[in-house]
Image (cartoon, rainbow, N blue to C red):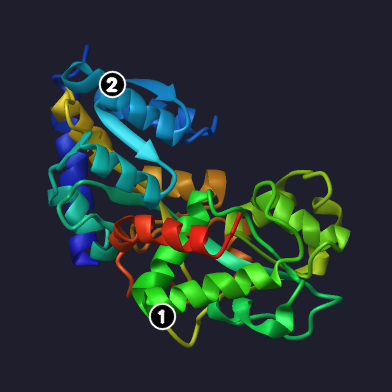
């Protein structure tokens, strides 16, 4: 706790120092986050530092391709994406550089950071198991159990091209080995209620429509149905139960919104200030309150809706960097078992 407090004080001090010299400074952000609520996040950063944030949004792969094409002339200072697997692609493309680690290292746990300081997590997203309460008495309690033949014809899950599933399989490769991971992937394919289709919300809608009895989705898609009227889901939300997987083992899989410094950042000091800011209390509370995400920094409270999911054991044993290191092998396994 002392380390976290010291890191936050250092972050605040650095931000105040920069603000006195940054009246006309700017930082250019390429982001695959598409939430209007992030406007307030960047406005607060500008209020604290005087640094203007110029943001370009797009799909992660498109932004990575743009960074590659721009090369040394790229105006990008910071790259933000919603999955560590996408950061693997940016890393392989050679469009990142190490950030300054003092503040970030003091705030963000090591398993949520790249070992060479190429990126770090700013918020976490849990991939958990949901089920129809009226049709499933004994839902799977682990990710591995999703492949149990007793659930044949019951599982809804997204396609293999979805990076959330790629990172989940990459974590299983790390935890159980490639052979076991391939057996698991084949078992899930055999248990699918339908061919993969749609996004995470569509998997949850499948529970309501009766197309499937068990679904895999990120936690916040479920919580959105409490906050707003999600067609085909909100009216029946109380009929859906959830399981925090692997609670007697390695814990629940969490993926990341991750941030990095672009390789050719023309404003590296301003970029570092923004990266440090993302680990501070305001930003961490923002991620928790505005999008029902879990903070990456320990000790930051949850919003009421997120807290309703209860306490759980997260997977802190599997380094998040393994999601990117095993991404290629994960896709090869998906292809081999014909996971569409």
**Which quarter of the image is occupied by the N terminus?**
bottom left
Asked whether residue 304 is in view, the answer is no
Callout 2 crowding tier (Cα within 10 Å): few <14, some 14–19, many ≥20: few
Callout 1 crowding tier (Cα within 10 Å): few <14, some 14–19, many ≥20: some
Q: CA distance from mark 2 to mark 1?
A: 40 Å
Residue pictured at 25% horizontal, 37% vertical: 93
> Looking at the image, which is closer to me, 231 or 214?
214
Residue pictured at 29% horizontal, 40% vertical: 90
125 to the left or right of 155: left
Instruction: Looking at this view, name the residue that lies furthest to the top.
Output: 24
Element at label 2: helix
Q: Position of residue 249 (x, y in %)?
A: 44, 85
In the figure, residue 19 lies in which quadrant? top left
Mark 2 vs mark 1: give the one in front: 2
User: Image height check: is 21 above or below 202?
Assistant: above
Q: Which residue has dot 1 on it?
A: 250
264 to the left or right of 80: left
Task: Give the tally of numbered discs.
Answer: 2
> Looking at the image, which is closer to me, 296 or 46?
296
The mark nearer the N terminus, 2 or 1, is: 2
Residue pictured at 21% horizontal, 41% vertical: 12
> Looking at the image, which is closer to me, 88 or 314?
88
In the figure, residue 124 lies in which quadrant? bottom left
User: Image height check: is 264 above or below 136?
Assistant: above
> Looking at the image, which is closer to me, 150 or 309?
150
Asked whether residue 202 is in view, the answer is yes
User: Image height check: is 206 above or below 73?
Assistant: below
Q: Position of residue 332 (x, y in %)?
A: 43, 59
Q: Which residue has dot 2 on it?
A: 69
27 to the left or right of 312: left
Element at label 1: loop
């Amino acid at each position: 706790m002392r380390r976290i407090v010291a890191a936050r004080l250092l972050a605040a001090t650095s931000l105040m120092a920069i603000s006195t010299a940054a009246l006309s400074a700017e930082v250019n952000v390429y982001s695959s986050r598409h939430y209007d609520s992030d406007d307030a996040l960047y406005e607060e950063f500008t209020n604290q530092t005087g640094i203007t944030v110029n943001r370009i949004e797009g799909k992660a792969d498109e932004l990575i391709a743009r960074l590659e094409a721009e090369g040394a002339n790229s105006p990008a200072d910071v790259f933000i994406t919603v999955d560590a697997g996408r950061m693997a692609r940016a890393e392989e493309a050679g469009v990142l550089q190490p950030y300054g680690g003092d503040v970030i290292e003091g705030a963000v746990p090591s398993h949520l950071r790249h070992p060479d300081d190429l990126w770090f997590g700013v918020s976490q997203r849990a991939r958990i198991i949901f089920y129809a309460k009226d049709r499933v008495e004994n839902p799977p309690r682990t990710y591995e159990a999703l492949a149990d033949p007793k659930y044949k014809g019951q599982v809804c899950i997204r396609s293999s091209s979805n990076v959330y599933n790629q990172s989940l399989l990459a974590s299983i490769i790390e935890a159980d080995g490639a052979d076991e991971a391939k057996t698991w992937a084949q078992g899930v394919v055999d248990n699918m209620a339908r061919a993969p289709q749609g996004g995470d919300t569509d998997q949850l809608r499948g529970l309501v429509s009766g197309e499937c009895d068990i679904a895999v989705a990120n936690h916040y898609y479920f919580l959105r149905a409490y906050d707003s009227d999600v067609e085909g889901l909100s009216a029946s939300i109380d009929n859906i139960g959830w399981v925090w997987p692997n609670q007697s083992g390695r814990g629940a899989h969490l993926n990341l919104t991750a941030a990095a410094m672009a390789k050719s950042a023309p404003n590296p000091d301003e970029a570092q200030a923004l990266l440090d800011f993302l680990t501070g209390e305001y930003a961490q509370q923002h991620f928790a309150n505005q999008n029902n995400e879990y903070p990456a920094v320990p000790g930051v409270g949850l919003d009421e809706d997120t807290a309703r999911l209860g306490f759980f054991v997260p997977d802190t044993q599997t380094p998040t960097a393994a999601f990117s290191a095993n991404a290629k092998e994960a896709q090869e396994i998906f292809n081999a078992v014909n996971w569409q």
